[in-house]
């Protein structure tokens, strides 16, 4: 995973020759001033940076990347003014596409506006930066790239599953305690069902959650065990999590695998060495970070070390020699007095830009907006906090709606918290939003067509009868908006779940074809990327059909593809023989189970009757893949058959597929390679709210805004309710974060469960805020009266309450509520 394509090395000879004449300096200063004067006030504060820490809190559409690129180019130019400096600017962002985008903008400023060589800086993703450092000092990092394989651990990853099995073998007493749950009558069928739930759901989910949370914060299994001693829950959840984490680490080391957190830890091991740290710091004059709200504690620590000057490091070398794996800045920061924090940060040449109100990854990654909020607070104390609150992306009514939603949600959260905790003061750090208002740009703003005129009212609020009526209304509005020339505008439908997107794509295909509108379902690519994993699940079942784990994995794949109805898979998998081949005395199976059993038996027949090299293609057809997915499956089959040539066997095929799935080295077949395909004109894009972050369209449609999805209900799956009215993984996550954030008493299970609920609710509302602020000219929102309880059964309609903020928007903007009766008369 090299990030070489996103770096710009310095050509020193070129610099020396082009900058040797001091007469260039006055001209350069004029050019710097010209760039600075072309920016908005918030962007200008970034451009004025010369040293020390600076926090930039920016609203959606404020021009963060443009401002950072301009500030970076100006900082590089000022380095040139100092002539003898050989140091570089390091710019760090969250994704590869963002890195490529900001790199192009910096180079353009250097070339077109400053007439300077396009050098003097590096652009990395966070993990690319860490990998670069670790690779340069492989003897210190312990990372030999030619000998290791990079993975992303997931709940279904074989390392996680293996760690669970080994933990069960090593901890039979604790496992039996989990099996008993709150009560257990010893009935054999129930015991087998609970075993399936624990081994395939509860423990893998706990392991996956804790590995991400703890490892990204520098927390070792030993530290988790220490924390567990401070808790009193009956299952010793953190202790169980520590054991699973430890087993996972042992497996990774024994097989020469690494994950993304290992990259950060490897880089930090390098920086523990005084000599290596000075080498790295002497190459850097500053670090600029974009999307800072998405950084984990260790990632932040890495940037702070690189941005620190040598004198400060010599005075505070104890920060780099702790016994634990490099845990300091964010978790330990809470212990230090404000003066110590200010002293620490005054020594950092670090500019961090972010928006805590757009933090939408904290419930499935270790990122938490609290860390960027803390950095902003510390910079504010030393008067190094700037705000970018002017945004030109959206028309004014959309800005007003987003601002209203933010304030209304915060007020509701505070009122609810006070009601539930009468004796406690609400923790403002966990309020869903920072009170940061989006403001329209000022007259004379350099952005072309800033705060454009709205289309229609600019905000349209619908309450359709049901989801089918929603499609009718949405289709009608799309046809009107695209008009005679559909190539003029861009539009997107933002959904909360991929299953909604798939259903909408099927419902809108004919309309788009008739009116020559391109329909692009982004979720199709995600489904193609799952082809190897789905094929592997079915092949493993064909190889060992009586394995409960393999049977359940195969059934899950079939449910996901909507080939069999959703049902209790644990009950089916606990007795494979009874499910697949019920005897004459067995009770008659319901039709849903019979359908699943027939399909599974057909897979087993194919395994016996077809040659091995045709199995993957057969399974692809069975899974009802579309054209792109079939192409991906053909590519997969060709690669696997090449790998096992000369040793063709089911074991060889499974081994080759397992390696592909584990190492994530297989890319689905793509026809395009740019994120611009999401925002093309003349196209109606269906995309999830999460993937829409960082993008914008002329028209944005937000259908299906129901309470059961936003903010959603924090519930315990029925199959695991024998453990209690909570989930182990979410309790563990909340306990770990509470310890990292507050350094106080670890909350008990009930308190941790409430904290987890609040984290989830807060993030879902931030996700809605992100979705609303993607629109430029028109924001279309709807909440149907009837909708599915679960989108795995879209035809099962029932009354659904709207997302709580939706009725509030209707009350606040009554002129934007669309009269459906009038529309029906027009039609």
Image (tube, rainbow, N blue to C red):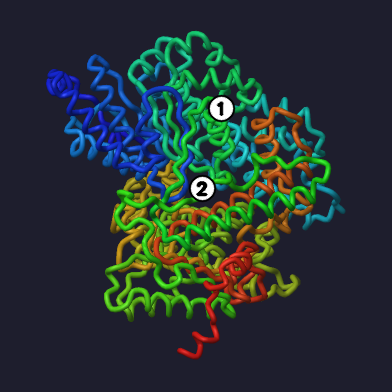
| Circle 1 residues within 10 Å: few <14, some 14–19, many ≥20 | few
Q: Is residue 393 above or below residue 11?
A: below
Helix or strand or loop: what does disc 2 sit on? Answer: helix
- Please say if the residues under marks 1 and 2 sit with CB atoms less than 8 Å apart: no
Helix or strand or loop: what does disc 1 sit on? Answer: helix
Tell me what residue is drawn at x 49 percent, y 85 percent.
Answer: 823
Tell me what residue is drawn at x 69 percent, y 35 percent.
Answer: 738
Res. 251 image quadrant: top right
The Cα atoms of the two marked residues, 1 and 2, are separated by: 23 Å
- The dot on residue 381 is 1
Quick one: label 1 or label 2, which is nearer the N terminus? 2
Say whether residue 287 is left or right of residue 797: left
Query: Hey, which residue is sitting farthest front in the picture?
Result: 443
- The image position of residue 8, as x and y in percent, is 26, 31
Q: Is residue 111 above or below residue 672?
A: above
Instruction: Specify the quadrant that holds the C terminus.
Output: bottom left
Looking at the image, which is closer to me, 416 or 593?
A: 416
Tell me what residue is drawn at x 41 percent, y 28 percent.
Answer: 130
- The dot on residue 577 is none
- The image position of residue 506, as x and y in percent, is 44, 74
Q: Is residue 237 above or below residue 815?
A: above
Looking at the image, which is closer to me, 527 or 611?
A: 527
| Circle 2 residues within 10 Å: few <14, some 14–19, many ≥20 | many
- The image position of residue 604, as x and y in percent, is 52, 63
Tell me what residue is drawn at x 67 percent, y 41 percent.
Answer: 428
Res. 528 image quadrant: bottom left
Q: Is residue 630 above or below residue 407?
A: below
Res. 114 image quadrant: top left
- The dot on residue 358 is 2
């Amino acid at each position: 995973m090299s990030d070489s394509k996103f770096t710009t090395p310095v050509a020193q000879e070129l610099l020396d020759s082009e900058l040797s004449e001091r007469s260039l300096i006055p001209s350069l200063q004029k050019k710097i001033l010209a760039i600075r004067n072309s920016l908005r006030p918030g962007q200008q504060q970034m451009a004025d940076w010369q040293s020390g820490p600076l926090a930039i809190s920016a609203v959606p559409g404020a021009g963060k990347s443009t401002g950072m690129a301009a500030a970076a180019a100006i900082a590089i130019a000022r380095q040139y003014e100092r002539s003898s400096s050989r140091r570089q600017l390091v710019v760090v962002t969250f994704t590869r596409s963002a890195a490529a985008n900001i790199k192009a903008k910096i180079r353009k400023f250097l070339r077109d506006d400053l007439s300077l060589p396009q050098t003097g800086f590096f652009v990395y993703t966070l993990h690319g930066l860490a990998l670069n450092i670790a690779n340069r000092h492989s003897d210190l990092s312990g990372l030999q790239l030619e000998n290791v394989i990079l993975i992303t651990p997931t709940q279904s990853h074989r390392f996680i599953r293996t760690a669970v099995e080994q933990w069960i073998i090593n901890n039979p007493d604790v496992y039996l305690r989990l099996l008993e749950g709150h009560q257990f009558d010893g009935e054999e069928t129930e015991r087998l069902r609970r075993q399936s739930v624990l081994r395939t759901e509860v423990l893998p989910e706990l392991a996956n959650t804790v590995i991400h949370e703890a490892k990204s914060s520098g927390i070792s299994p030993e530290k988790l065990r220490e924390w567990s001693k401070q808790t009193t829950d009956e299952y010793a959840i953190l202790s169980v999590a520590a054991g699973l984490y430890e087993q996972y680490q042992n497996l990774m080391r024994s097989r020469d695998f690494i994950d993304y957190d290992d990259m950060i830890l490897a880089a930090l091991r390098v920086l523990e060495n005084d000599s290596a740290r000075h080498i790295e710091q002497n190459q850097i004059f500053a670090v600029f970070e974009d999307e800072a709200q998405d950084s984990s504690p260790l990632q932040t620590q890495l940037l702070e070390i690189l941005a620190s000057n040598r004198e400060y490091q010599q005075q505070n070398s104890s920060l780099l020699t702790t016994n634990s794996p490099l845990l300091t800045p964010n978790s330990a920061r809470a212990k230090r007095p404000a003066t110590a924090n200010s002293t620490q940060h005054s020594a950092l040449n670090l500019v961090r830009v972010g928006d805590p109100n757009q933090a939408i990854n904290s419930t499935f990654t270790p990122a938490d907006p609290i860390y960027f909020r803390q950095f902003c607070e510390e910079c504010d104390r030393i008067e190094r906090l700037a705000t970018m609150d002017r945004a030109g992306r959206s028309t004014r009514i959309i800005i007003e709606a987003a601002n209203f939603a933010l304030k209304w949600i915060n007020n509701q959260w505070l009122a609810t918290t006070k009601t539930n905790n009468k004796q406690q003061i609400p923790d403002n750090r966990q309020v869903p939003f920072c009170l940061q208002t989006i403001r329209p740009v000022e007259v004379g703003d350099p952005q072309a067509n800033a705060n454009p005129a709205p289309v229609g009212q600019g905000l349209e609020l619908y309450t359709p009868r049901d989801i089918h009526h929603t499609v009718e209304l949405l289709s009608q509005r799309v046809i009107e908006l695209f008009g005679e020339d559909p190539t003029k505008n861009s539009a997107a439908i933002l959904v909360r779940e991929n299953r909604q997107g798939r259903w909408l794509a099927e419902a809108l295909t004919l309309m788009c074809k008739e009116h020559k509108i391109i329909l692009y379902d982004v979720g199709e690519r995600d489904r193609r990327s799952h082809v190897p994993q789905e094929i592997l699940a079915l092949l493993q079942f064909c190889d060992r059909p009586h394995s409960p784990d393999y049977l359940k994995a195969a059934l899950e794949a079939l449910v996901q593809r909507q080939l069999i109805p959703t049902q209790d898979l644990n009950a089916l998998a606990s007795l494979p023989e009874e499910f697949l081949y019920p005897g004459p005395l067995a009770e008659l199976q319901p039709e849903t189970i019979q359908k699943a059993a027939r399909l599974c038996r057909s897979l087993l027949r194919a395994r016996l009757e077809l040659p091995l090299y045709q199995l993957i293609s057969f399974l692809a057809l069975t899974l009802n893949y579309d054209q792109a997915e079939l192409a991906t499956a053909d590519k997969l089959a060709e690669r696997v058959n090449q790998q096992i040539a000369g040793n063709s066997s089911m074991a060889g095929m499974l081994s080759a597929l397992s390696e592909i799935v584990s190492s994530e080295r297989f890319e689905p077949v793509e026809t395009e390679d740019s994120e611009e395909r999401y925002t093309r004109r003349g196209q109606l894009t269906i995309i999830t709210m999460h993937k829409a972050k960082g993008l914008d369209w002329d028209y944005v449609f937000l259908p299906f805004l129901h309470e059961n999805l936003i903010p959603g209900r924090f519930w315990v799956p029925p199959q695991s309710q024998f453990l209690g009215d909570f989930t182990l993984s979410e309790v563990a996550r909340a306990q770990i974060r509470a310890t990292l954030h507050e350094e106080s008493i670890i909350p008990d299970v009930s308190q941790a469960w409430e904290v987890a609920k609040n984290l989830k609710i807060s993030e879902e509302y931030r996700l809605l805020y992100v979705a609303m602020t993607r629109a430029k000219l028109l924001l279309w929102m709807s909440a149907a009266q009837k909708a599915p309880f679960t989108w795995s059964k879209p035809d099962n309609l029932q009354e659904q309450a709207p997302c709580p903020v939706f009725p509030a928007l209707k009350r606040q903007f009554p002129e934007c509520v669309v009269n459906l009766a009038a529309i029906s008369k027009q039609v």
